[in-house]
Image (cartoon, rainbow, N blue to C red):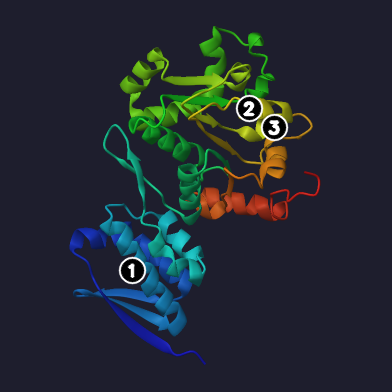
Amino acid sequence: MEKVVERQLELPEPDLALNLFGANDKNIRIIEDRLDVKITARYDELHIRGFEKKADIAVDIIKKLMTIIQGGELITEQNIRYLLDMTEEERQSFRNIPMDQICVTYRGRPIKIKTFGQKKYVDAMRDNPIVFGIGPAGTGKTFLAVAMAVKAFREKMINRIILTRPAVEAGERLGFLPGDLQNKVDPYLRPLYDALYQIMGPETYHTNLEKGIIEVAPLAYMRGRTLDDSFIILDEAQNTTAEQMKMFLTRMGIGSRMVITGDITQIDLPGGKSGLVEARRILRNIEGISMVHLTHKDVVRHELVQRIIKAYEKETKGGVNDGKKE
């Protein structure tokens, strides 16, 4: 029978300890409930009591939370549940996520990698001309791609940032919508604007837009072009047709990089035949093209988003079509 043990850890200074414990000790309560341990603070020590294996896991998680705190990050419920969901092997490899800083926003806020999946995704964008980021909502697919694009632009690796989405709800026939072109495409491209605004700031964004350094346009407007020295992001790619995906990929010019993001569980196309699904099958073994699959573990939005995604995956017996019809 496994024995009950008590482990001790040195408490950090008060400000850091408050970050660790959270409001009304919420962070500690999550660990206690999941691992069935008791965690108490006595003077300058933290005491963890429970069955040996669970107590050791709790100690390991608290140490890793301290690593996050020392990096200047605010501990969130997502941080804690992510560590709790890790396998033992993943937790041992946690030190290999240095919480890499990709870039900083115009307000000086650092944009950092937060999960193993995100690290794999960012490393792929650093190392490959074309990257597919496939996964559910909230995993940072689009935001991290925009951050990498801004970083490449600031470091003068590329001359332009081009962001595009298929306007699938209008069947790419934007003429039926009221207003000028900008009014027509704004609803479909708003998430891309938001990411650029947050990182670059509105003033820099608008200046670069006027200079043609930044372009945000519906996918239909990519046809017939060759895009050199550009960082090109295709968002919501699950809603491209096979023809649109091929058209987009063949726009790539000299000195350019492409990132294609999408969630193949949310295909809105009539008939459901997605160019992203087909590209995943056709291009998976081509050198220079990386396919990165993110999961519910990589969700960095509200913890409920993880639960929602897991529930849908369970309902559809895994969610992702593995492929015999691809």
Residue beneath label 3, please? 268
Could you say where residue 6 lies in the image, as x and y percent from the top left? Answer: 34, 84
Image-based side of 109 in relation to 305, left or right = left
SS for callout 2: loop
When asked about the image quadrant of residue 147, the answer is: top left
Dot 3, how many residues are within 10 Å of its Cα: few (below 14), some (14-19), or many (20+)? Answer: some
Circle 1 SS class: helix
Dot placed on the residue nearer the N-terminal end, 3 or 1: 1
Q: How busy is the neighbourhood of tag 1: few (under 14 within 10 Å), some, or many (20 plus)?
A: few
Estimate the x, y position of residue 196 in percent, counting from the top left: 41, 28
Please name the residue shown 54% across and 19% down the image.
217
**What residue is rendered at 54% in x and 7% in y?**
180
Which residue is painted at 40% across and 78% down in the image? Answer: 56
Q: Position of residue 139 (x, y in %)?
A: 51, 46
Look at the picture and state if 40 lies above or below 183: below
Q: Which residue is mark 2?
A: 250
